Amino acid sequence: MVGVDVAAVRWLASPEGQQLLHDLPPYDERTAIRLATRYRANGLPADHVAALLTQQRLRTKAREKFGEFADDMLFTADGVEQATRLEVAAGHAQRFAEASIATVHDLGCGIGADALALAVLGVTVQAIDADPVTAAVADANLRPWPDSRARVGRVEDFLPPADAARDRIGAWLDPARRISGVADIHGRARRVFRRDDISPTWDTVQAIAAHIPATGVKLSPSFPHDHIPRGAEAQWVSRAGELLECVIWWGPLVRTSGRTARVIRPGRPAIEVTEDQATGDVPTVVDDKGIAAWLYETDRALVQAGLVGAVTAAVDGHELEPGLGLVTADTAYDVGFARRYAVTDTLPLSTKELRTWLRRNAITGLTIKKRGVRLDDDALRRDLRIGRGAGSGKSETILLTRVAGSQIVLVLEPAPAA
C-alpha cells in the first residue's frame, strides 16, 4: 500500500479500524474527498484517513476475486492484482487437507489468499513474506485463526523441519513472478514468465520439496513439460476459459503423476483431466474438406497441458492443426472441457472473399476469434468496411485459423450451454 506502513495496517486490524471500515460505503471517487474531510474534522489522523480510503477502494475492487469475503480482509494494491482467486485457492488447500497435512508453511504468502483457504479447512498455517507491510496484511487476514500467523521472512532463510513427513508438515510456494518497481503500461508490477526469473529460484523450490515431501508451487502456465520433476504432478488450471497457472505437486499431494488439467467452471463442479484420458496419437484433418459439422474449442488448460487428445477421444474427432486445440467432429457432445460450435460455412482467409460473403448474407455485426493466426482485428474490420454491431443486419461469429498449413475462416454458431 503506497504511503501505508505496518503501524497503519495494525490500526486497520484493530477494533476501531475494523468498525470504521465496516461503516464505510462502497468506494466512490466522487465522494472520497468529502468523506476524507469529514473524518479529518472528527479528529482522525491523516494517515488513518488515507489508510481507510485506500482499503475502501481496494475492497471494492477485490470483491471480483473474493466475493463477500473481501469485506473482512485487508489488501495491498499489488496484492489484489496478484492474489489467487478464492475458488482457485480452495482447490490448492483441498490437496493438503485430503493428504491430512496438519501444518503448512506458506512461503511467500502475499496477502494470504492461499493461507486463508488452508485455515478454513482446519490446516494450521505458518506464513512468511519478505515485505513487512504485506506480511502484516496477511497476519491481519489470518486473525480469525489464532494458531495461524504470518511474519516477515525470506524463503531463502527458511529452515525445513527435520522430519516433515512424520509430523504431517507441508509447504506451499507462490514465487514472485513480477519485477518490483518495474511497471507495465497499466501501472502494475511487470510480470516475468521465464522459470529462471522467479524468486525464490527454481533450485530453492526443489530443495524445499526434497526436504518436505508435501510441497506445492504455483508457477507460470508456460512451464515447460520437459522440466516436470520425476514423480511429480504438473497441473494447468483455468477458470472460465482463462488460463491462470501451472502448479507442481510433490509427494502425498500428487493425485496423478505427469500432466493434468483442472478446468474451473463458475457455478459448476470443476473438471480434472489426466494423461490417461488423452492416450494415443491425436488425429488431424488432412485439408479443409475434413471439417465436420461441429467444432470444439478445447479449454486452454488442456491445450497448455498437451491433453487435446482427451477432446478428440471424447467426441471421436480430429484436431484441425497440432497445438491449436480445435477439434472437428460429426456428432454433438456436451464436453465440460471444450466449447462446442456449429460450423455453418468455410471460407479461405481472404479480405475480398470475406467482404463478398458479408454483403451476400447482410452481415453488419461480426465477432472475430483467432487461433494460430496473427492479424490485426481493427485493420481487418476497416478492410471489410464493417463496424462493431452497427446496422440492422445479422451478426455472426468467425474464427480465423489454420488447417493443414492453410489459413481459413470458419463461420460459427455457438451451441447452447449444457
Image (cartoon, rainbow, N blue to C red):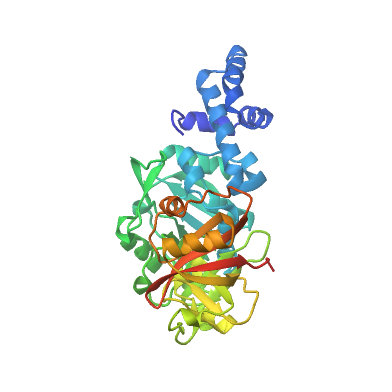
Give the total number of marks visible in the rendering.
0
Q: Taking 370 as reference, is 193 left or right?
A: left
x and y percent of residue 69 in the render?
A: 64, 45
Q: Taking 59 as reference, is 204 left or right?
A: left
Q: Assign the C terminus to one quadrant of the image.
A: bottom right
x and y percent of residue 298 in the render?
A: 53, 70
The quarter of the displayed image where residue 17 is located: top right
Q: Is residue 145 visible?
A: no
Q: Nearer the viewer, residue 5 or 226?
A: 226
Q: Nearer the viewer, residue 325 or 360?
A: 360
Is residue 286 placed above or below 149 in the rendered structure? below
Q: Nearer the viewer, residue 238 or 407?
A: 407
- The residue that appears at 40% across and 54% down in the rendered structure is 376
Residue at the extreme top of the image, as rendered: 41
Q: Taking 155 as reference, is 368 left or right?
A: right
x and y percent of residue 387 in the render?
A: 52, 48
Residue at the extreme bottom of the image, as rendered: 280
- The residue that appears at 40% across and 46% down in the rendered structure is 153
Q: Is residue 67 visible?
A: yes
x and y percent of residue 248 in the render?
A: 44, 67
Q: Nearer the viewer, residue 246 or 357?
A: 357
The quarter of the displayed image where residue 401 is located: bottom left
